[in-house]
Amino acid sequence: MKPVEDVQNGQMALHGKGPKVKKEKNSLWVESWSRFKKNRLAIFGLSIVLFFVLLAIFAPLIAPEGINNQKLAERLQSPSINHWFGTDDFGRDILSRVIYGARISIWIGVLSVVGSMIIGSLLGVIAAYYGRLVDVIISRAFDIMLAFPSILLAIAIVAVLGASLENALIAIAIINVPNFGRLIRSKVLSVKEEEYIMAAKSLGMSDVRIILRHVLPNSLAPIIVQASLAVGTAILEAAALGFLGMGAEAPQPEWGKMLADAQQYMIQAPWTMIFPGLAIMLTVLGFNLLGDGLRDALDPKMKS
Amino acid sequence: MFAYTIRRLLQLIPVLFGMTLLVFFIVHAIPGNPAQVMLGQHATEESVQKLTNELGLNEPWYIQYINYLQNLVTGDLGDSIRTGAPIVEELWPYLAATMELSVVAMIFAVFIGVNAGIISAWFQNKWIDYVAMFVALIGISVPIFWLGLMQQWLFAVELGWFAPTGREDARAPIDPITHFFLIDTLIQGDWDGFVETVRRLVLPATALGTFSGAFIARMTRSSMLEVMRSDYIRTARSKGMKMIKVVYKHALKNSIIPVLTVVGLQMGLLLGGAVLTETIFGWPGIGRYIYDAIQFRDYPVVQSGILIVALFFVLINLCVDLLYSVVDPRIKYK
């Protein structure tokens, strides 16, 4: 019974109508959402992520001061009612800088993942769909890239491009391409063999159309899961590059860079390094919980 | 098994080849002329030109690449621009420092991770499970460099239990034989040196191993939970076998395969993560060596250093693959 249904689904989707397809598509997401809602840790993760996203969007309204308000008379003050997180060596309010820092970290995390997702998907789909030599070349290229510890590769790429926030973003996007590429390749390989793809093919659909309309949507769940986990990793990697002086430049309030600057005041002013680090950890924790929750919701088989 | 090993080794060749190509291109894309760097800012144009010719830098890229490969095959990694010494001779102490750090970090990660995972699975949905998994979640989310800084601040600066930086006490340097200081001090019967080495290893190794430990704990837990549901475990339990024996003797053996994969992957991550840990703790390892070389535009060192680390990574993963069949006799390679 099922194969027949699948072929019908394929045909209906081909003509752009077919209420049944739409309904099933919705029900997958509705079902997943109801599973997601019941997972308290996932909701906690989502709340953390939303908190930092809102912080990033409304930073100018929330932050008590600007990112570079230097008051040398108030330098290295410990946390107080005036400065909740204390001040740094330039007398800048750390709370404000941490709030603005959310902008940088979320921006770099999300954008780099979108970048690696697009390039990785493209390469993965091409490798899987066309197979043979194309597949061998692309897959070997992924193997080679994955043979390097990622942060080392990122450092090398930044060394080529020059140290800046944008280049750190590009480097992080590049090093994460193989992860997406491999995932999508394997997903497409399995989807490719389904009957509805064969049906679409026999109806004379073009490769590009089949990939965009059938293959990618049916591989979406693992991509979403991987993406949300990858944002966490990307934020960590960006902070690491910032910490090594290969990302943000002064006075950008990038959390990793703030930590690097705070290092020398460890003895007099430990709060200068406590809060940026906490911010990184919480954001990454949020994305990790969200990713775990999404995986459990979208793919219940994976749930442990 | 033998045939499989040979085949895997042969498969490595194109990957290694690709790695040399990638590293070659990255390093050659780094802006700046190495000859200029070597001679300094005040060098005359002629002398820079002369050295560029000598180094073969104005040859087409493929000639340069072939020369580079030829040198590699004969074991010549080139000379460091900064020190002028052959990299092959210079490399070992750095590599040994990183290996010692990574291995200790891995032992810490496996010991903590596997046991935490087992206990979590054993007491599933009890408070101890929640605590362990919450700590593991923090462990995979915490930036390694921040953790290192916090440890340094708390245990070295505030409490004074450990030395904040360095691999050895500058006043009582360790006489290197293998450059693995734990081994060297033992060989020489230098008990104080051994204790000092351990004291200096604790903070960087735990900082470096935390992420891997947390990851392994999560992996072990889910893998154990799956095995614990199987019939033979129920049989063992119903025969009255003690839980601790069931868990450590029967369940662990069958849940270790996915954990092993993770250990292999994590070992590579440790080599990369070492750059950060080494920076914070002033550890004279390969990560730091490469990082400093990039800052100094010491191209040959960057090129060889990255390649060596990647080579280790690839070899470790190969070893893990081969280890599978030792751990799990059900896996047979053809």
Image (cartoon, coloured by chain):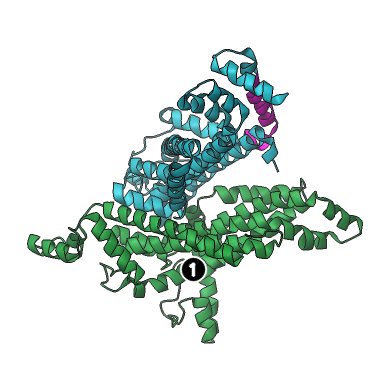
B329 up-or-down from A210: above or below: below
Image side of residue A245 versus residue B176, left or right: left
Range shown magenta: A24-44
Q: Chain B is drawn in which colour?
A: green
State whether residue A129 appears in this view.
yes
Location of residue A24 with respect to B333 vertically, above or below: above
Image x and y of residue B49, in percent: 11, 61
Residue located beneath label 1 in the image? B99
SS assignment for the magenta stretch, majority = helix
Which residue appears at 73% of the width and 23% of the height?
A1
At mark 1, the secondary structure is helix
Residue at 10%, 65% in the rendered image: B47
Q: Quadrant of the N terminus of chain B?
A: bottom right
Q: Is the C terminus of chain B in the top left, top right, bottom left or bottom right quadrant?
A: bottom right
Question: Which chain wears cyan?
Answer: A
Taking the magenta stretch, the answer to whether it contains residue A29 is: yes
